[in-house]
Image (cartoon, rainbow, N blue to C red):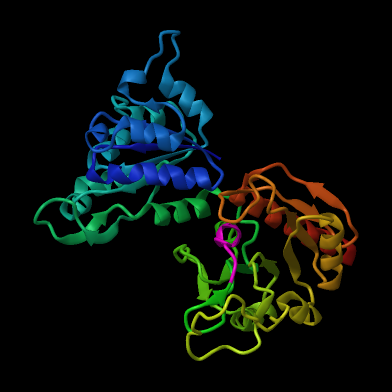
Amino acid sequence: MRVIVAASGGVAALKTPSLLRRLAGAGHEVRAAATDDALHFVTKLSLAVAAGGEVFDRAAWFRPDGEARHLSWARWADVLVVAPATADALSSAATARADDVISALIVAGTPRVVWVPAMNTAMWHHPLVQENVRTLRAVGHHVLEPADGLLAAKGEGSGVGRMPEPEEIALHLAGLLGPRDLAGRRVLVSAGPTREPLDPVRYLSNPSSGKMGFAVAEAARDRGAGVTLVTGPVTLADPVGIATVRVERAEEMLAALSAHFDATDLVVMSAAVADWQAAEIASEKKAKGGERQTLELVRTPDILLTLAPRKRQQVVVGFAMETHQGVERAADKARRKQLDFILLNYPTREGSAFGGDDNQVTFVTPEGRVDELPRMSKRAVAEQILDRALGIWASRAEHAE
């Protein structure tokens, strides 16, 4: 989706770069625009950096080659998001003044417009402002309701009129702009590492960040699914609109996933579960002594292998990280654990290690069919997973007829 995010002149314009980054991270092409008053609150440079390109403001309205920016950008865009939207911006658009970049983009024919109002409570409730809102809605514009919270002006306290946080806006836009092809589906995702304690202060684990699993959960949510995310210890905040269960150990992750497995349509097991745990967990911290110590380990439960006998119509997806013989090992894992496909990556390959924002994966089927993807964002990988799950459901439906 091609999205122009335009800031008008309110304090909440400070949040506009964050919104741009979130939309870009969700896979949208973004551009930034700003009114003269908006640039009193947010710098043109911060908008340009967040958008990854130039900013459309009054100074860039007409180019030396004759291009009229409001016309070319309106043709480029699928949607214009005005965030923040002031009372003045609403009035300018409702009366088609076209004397600022936002109303000019609208009059030039941007196909869809979303308003994110931000103003004082008294201004938001004023009859003339509400009349402008009704006018814009009547011509097909989408106007979000402002949030109830602390207002920016000194002494005004709290009230309705605050601009929602960027993550809330992005969530709303995802439902408005993206495909809803997973509506009615239940998706279960695991993410992050597990920690297996050795004593009260030490544990076995790995550096998984959880970003891949969180990306899958958010992509599924944005496409209309009901999502449950089971995550090991990570620093990421709980995603908005997703039921999140936090666990520590492999046994806890198995219990949480097992509780939701039967009612799920799609399971994506991206967690990096520890393979080993201490045979006995010490009740006290072991003192350092000698040059060597022997630690007895036993296997943690194999979550996918445990759940496999309960598989009915679910699409089940796993991950495999290998340093050699990757395809053969991944295909074998998919067969043993009754996976529909598995994503293989190599920790030694640039862009595939733990913690990054990108990933390079190879889709492998139980039969050994291979589809190697180029390096891409983890959100883009997540969309690929969901697209392939949809393909499996469609194929099953076709064969059932």
Q: Extreme left residue here?
A: 155
Q: Position of residue 257 (x, y in %)?
A: 64, 78
Q: Name which quarter of the figure residue 33 lies in.
A: top left
Q: Name which quarter of the figure residue 338 lies in.
A: bottom right
Q: Name which quarter of the figure residue 21 lies in.
A: top left
Residue at 45% of width from left, 22% of height from top? 71
Q: Position of residue 357 (x, y in %)?
A: 56, 49
Q: Residues in magenta?
A: 205-216
Q: Position of residue 367 (x, y in %)?
A: 91, 60
Q: Is residue 49 visible?
A: yes
Q: Nearer the viewer, residue 134 or 293?
A: 293
Q: Is residue 295 magenta?
A: no
Q: Is residue 215 magenta?
A: yes
In the image, residue 75 sits, relative to residue 24, either above or below, namely above
Q: Quadrant of the N terminus?
A: top right
In the image, residue 261 sits, relative to residue 371, either above or below, namely below
Q: Extreme front residue here?
A: 290
In the image, residue 21 sits, relative to residue 354, either above or below, namely above
Q: Nearer the viewer, residue 39 or 195?
A: 195
Q: Nearer the viewer, residue 327 or 397?
A: 327
Q: Is residue 140 visible?
A: no
Residue at 40% of width from left, 31% of height from top? 48
In the image, residue 274 sits, relative to residue 212, either above or below, namely below
Give the mark count.
0
Q: Position of residue 24 (x, y in %)?
A: 50, 42
Left or right, 401 with reference to 129:
right
Residue at 65% of width from left, 56% of height from top? 181
Q: Quadrant of the C terminus?
A: bottom right
